Structures are given as C-alpha cells and as structure tokens.
Image (tube, rainbow, N blue to C red):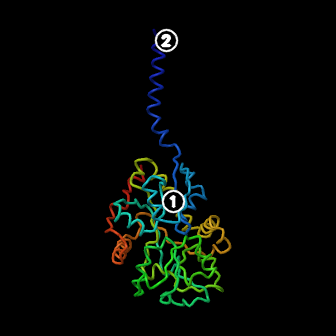
Amino acid sequence: MTKLLNILIVVLAAALVFVILYPQIQQNRPINLKFACDSSATSLPILVGMDESLFAKNRIKATLVFYSDPDQALADLFAGKVDVGVFPWSTVLKRIATKGETLKVFMGEEYRQSLPVDAIVAPLKSPVKTVADIRGRRFIYPPQVRDYIPVMLTDLGMRPEDIKLSEVPFSSLTQELAAGTCDAAWLIEPLLCPLDTTQYRIVQYSALARFVFQPFPGAAIGFAPRFPQTYRQGPKRLKIATDAAMAIVETKGDLAKQVLAKYFPYSAKFSGFCRLPELQRNTEINKTAVKALALRLKLTGVPADTVNMQNIFPDPLIFSR
C-alpha cells in the first residue's frame, strides 16, 4: 500500500510539474513566420533581420515571400498565407476603406525630398526633360506607386488619358528603359543607385515627396489583428528583432546597404550610393502625414478611409508580454 501511494505521489508530482512547465515550454518554442516583402529598399529592415540572424536569435523561423503586387500581398496576409509584411501606405488605406480590414502597423518608413529614395528618370534620347513632358508619352511605373499616379497627374494638371501609362513589375523597369520601349520611368531604390547617368537623366528626384506629400509616408510594416492571439509572444519577439534591425540600418548604414546588395545583386557595385528610407518605430510614425496622405488619395479618386489611429497602431502592451 505504501509503495502504491509513493508511486501515486510521484505521478501526481510529475503531472503538476508538467502543468506548470508546459505553457512556458510552448511560449519558448520557435515560431514560424512568413514575411511579405517587395524588391524595393522598403524591405530592408526585414532583410537585415534575416541576414543578421536577428529573427533566429529571437526564436523566429523566418521565411521571405516576395511579391510584385502589394495589394495581393496584403490580401494574402489577411487570408493567413503570410504573417507580417511591408506595404505602401496607400495599400493599407485602401484595404481599410474597401474591406474594413486594418493592418496593425508597428514600424513606418518615410521619404523626404532631401533623401531621394525614388525618382522619375528618362533615357538621354527621350524627349522627356521635365515631368510635364510625360504628356502623350509612354510612362512606366511599378505597382508600389500605382495609387500615387492620379495624385501626381492632378498636381501636374493632367488626366490618365493624357499619358500612355503602363504598370510594369519592379524587376522589369530597368530592362524596359534599356530597351527603349518607354519615354520615362518611375524608379525606387535600389534601382536608382546603379543607374548609368551617361545613358539616363534624372527628370525628378523624390517624386513622391514632391507631388504627393512632404514628408511622404513611404511604407508600413505590420501584421493582421489575429497575430497576437495566434502567437502570444510573437509581437514581443518581432519587435525586439526589428528594432535591432532598425538600429543596424541607422548606425551601420554601409552594412545595411551591403545586405540590400546581397538580395539584389544588380546593385552590388553601387549599393554604397543607395538612399534608404527613414525608419520609424511605432511611437515615431508621422501620423499627421498618414492622415494627410489618406485625404490626398480620396480627393483624387483612390479609395481611402479616414484614418483611425487607434485601430491602425497596436497597443504597446502587446510588445511587453
């Protein structure tokens, strides 16, 4: 009887230890996250986090998924196909207006006229010497700026039918320029830094900040509302890793540019000249600029909604759990 009682005590003690430790074991297990990226410099914080093993150090098994179309990337995030992503702010605002789905933004990126991350360029033989010269010409642009075309044209006193507009995948822009099939193109880093200025002219640096809003809210990095419930410690680990990536971009710019060159080898020889967006933690995001951008989009016919900042930006407490 005593032996049986001792066995029972041991079993109960083991069960109690399991009940106590199991939640902690589960919380400390690595989590698998898919990151939606594009091929522009806006993905740099995620690329640095991957290349410098910052996600791995915070028990995140990261997989990068590259998208050409930001609208599709955000749709896949809300469908659960990816977990975290970097998106143009216009894509986020459209999704709120048309689907009522809100990205939880924990990091932002900003472009300034003094820091030309984007530009409109043209072959030297092209008749496009100023932005106004795109009237009647073939003008190509990547999906990342599709929502800003109407804003720029309104600012220039033009309509879409006044120009031969063509949306081209980010990776094909420079090929079309080289082939001479367009008169001008809208480029974003890291396509700008390797541009041969003996073959092309810069028609307008910082077109987004010049024609849309200054300073321009370049991109939002965030996750779906379900993310904190799916991964209880996910937001905390994610923020630690991305804050560390941001610190590298801010304090070791040359290293960050080398990371960009690893993922986009065509810019390797010129990555040191690449301009990078200004990164902002969730408490630093220029909310006034985001609100102004939403208004600009609505006035030019792009679906956008009044920005409720309480819905977009997650409660800081979820990053400390």
Q: Position of residue 251 (x, y in %)?
A: 56, 68
Q: SS at mark 1?
A: strand
Residue in the picture at 61% in, 85% down: 200
Contact check, label 2 and label 1, Cβ < 8 Å: no
Count of numbered labels shown in the rendering: 2
Which residue of the protein is positioned furthest toward the right in this rendering? 269
The image quarter in which residue 107 lies? bottom left
Mark 2 and mark 1 lie on one chain; the one further toward the N terminus is 2
Give the quarter of the figure containing the N terminus: top left
Report the front residue among 291 and 140: 140
Return the x and y of residue 37 as percentages of the image width and height. 53, 62
Residue of label 1: 36
What residue sits right under mark 2 in the picture? 3
Tell me if mark 1 has few (under 14), some (14-19) or many (20+) residues whose alpha carbon lies within 10 angstroms of its own.
many
Tag 2, which secondary structure? Answer: helix
Judging depth in this view, the residue of 103 and 254 nearest the camera is: 103
In this rendering, is residue 250 above or below 187?
above
Rendering coords of residue 116 (x, y %):
52, 79
* 2 vs 1, front mark: 1
Q: Label 2: few (<14), some or many (≥20) within 10 Å?
A: few
Q: Which labelled disc corresponds to residue 24? A: none
Residue 186, percent from left and from top: 53, 78
Q: Residue at x 34, y 74 (%)?
A: 298
Q: Name which residue type carries label 1.
A: Ala
The three-letter code of the residue at mark 2 reads: Lys
Task: Judge from the rendering whether residue 289 lies leftward or rightward of residue 43; answer left or right.
Answer: left
Residue at the (48%, 53%) spot, across then down:
81
Q: How far, Cα to Cα, is label 2 from label 1? A: 59 Å
Most extreme residue toward the top is 1
